[in-house]
Amino acid sequence: MALATKAVPHLMTLADLSPGQIQRILAHSYHLKRTAQPWLAPVQSKSGNQAKLKLRMPSQSLFSKTVALLFSKRSTRTRVSAETAASLLGGQALFLGKEDIQIGVNETVRDSARVIGGLCEGIFARVGDHSEIEELARYSPVPVLNALSSLWHPTQVLADLLTLQEHAHLFDPAAPPPPNADDLTSQRYRRLVDVRPLTVAYLGDSANVLHDMLVTYPRLGHQLRVASPENAKYRAPKEVWDRVVQLGCDKNIHWTADPRDAVKGADLVVTDTWISMGQEAEKAQRLKDFEGYQVTEKLCREGGANPDWKFMHCLPRKQDEVDDEVFYGPRSLAFPVSDNRKWTIMAMFDLLFGKWSLLERTKEAAEGPSA
Ligand SMILES: NC(=O)OP(=O)(O)O
């Protein structure tokens, strides 16, 4: 168990962070990416190996430490990012699937939190109902980070934001270009730049990824235009909307049932699966309810999106919500986003599990939100 005297920090949603703290995580993710990437390049010669010896090490704040990956649901990106990120930080990740351990079957969440937190230095948890991760955090002696719950998916939205900032030049020709091949192997890099304020359209179900967008994008200066069917089950639940209003984000969110209305003026179009894990029995009804919501060139042209609009998806993707032309086409940032899951999770592990400094107040945070 961590021998620390200050209150244990946890992170359930980006709503718990100020814009300054979010920007600090993004800048740190970019720094870790640029520092660690040259170490990952193949060693092709003796001189190449010697060049590596001159490289700076990324933070080793997890040296000798273990992060428990307490996952009760499937995962590709989040799990692989977590395991590889822990290794780069000098520590290890321990995958604990729901079939592997006693939690929820022979042991309560409360007791499991105390036991696992006594043996590991951080808990990255993917749960069903959000109340499960709240309970873990209540009883864990070490920090708990949300790897996805019924309400929130904070590490996904951090990867989305890092990708937008890295691709600022796609939205503003005056923004600096991305790093070239030499920059990527030499630890030489420019600072991460801000992306200009964007109009962002989201088409689909009101699920955990959108919820973290709702409490974050408006505070970073972006406008959100959301389309989901009229049915209340496809709209943000009260506990999410209360946070949206509390943070003043609702003023910059336009919500409609018409996907063409939502993409009007959009610089970026985002979607997610219409059938989340656990909703498989509702598939037929959901496919019917979301008819007309598939992201296509035609829909975005007819709705009046910015002709240079770009596309993002958290993955895994199905053809229902976006066609192949968009998903595999030049507008798509889906795979750069999945690459960035590793670097944003690495930053969170470093700041939350390694250093316990994530929630420290930045100068900006102390002065209040800027947007
Ligand atoms: N986007 C996302 O969370 O992917 P996984 O479910 O594969 O981790």
Image (spheres, grey):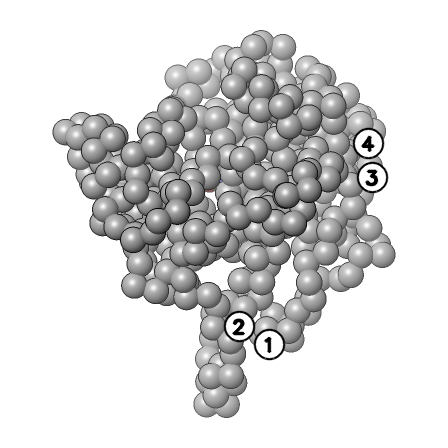
Q: Are marks 2 and 4 in contact (CB under 8 Å)?
A: no
Residue sitting nearer the eye, 279 or 190: 190
Q: Earlier in the sequence, mark 4 or mark 1?
A: 1
**Label 1 element class:** helix
Q: Earlier in the sequence, mark 1 or mark 2?
A: 2
Quadrant placement of the C terminus: top right
Residue at point 85%, 56% (across, down): 174
Please give left or right for residue 308 compared with residue 39 in the image.
right
Q: Earlier in the sequence, mark 2 or mark 4?
A: 2
Q: Position of residue 195 (x, y in %)?
A: 74, 48
Q: Position of residue 132 (x, y in %)?
A: 34, 27
Inspect this view and state whether residue 283 appears: yes
Residue sitting nearer the eye, 246 or 268: 246
Q: Position of residue 227 (x, y in %)?
A: 67, 21
For marks 1 and 3, give the CA distance: 36 Å
Inspect this view and state whether residue 161 appears: no
Label 3 crowd bin: few (<14), some (14–19), many (20+), radius 10 Å: few
Q: Are marks 3 and 4 in contact (CB under 8 Å)?
A: no
Q: Earlier in the sequence, mark 3 or mark 4?
A: 4
Q: Which residue is mark 1?
A: 186
Q: Which mark is residue 307?
A: 3
Q: Which mark is residue 265?
A: 4
Q: Are marks 4 and 1 in contact (CB under 8 Å)?
A: no
For marks 3 and 4, give the CA distance: 9 Å
- Farthest right residue in view: 174
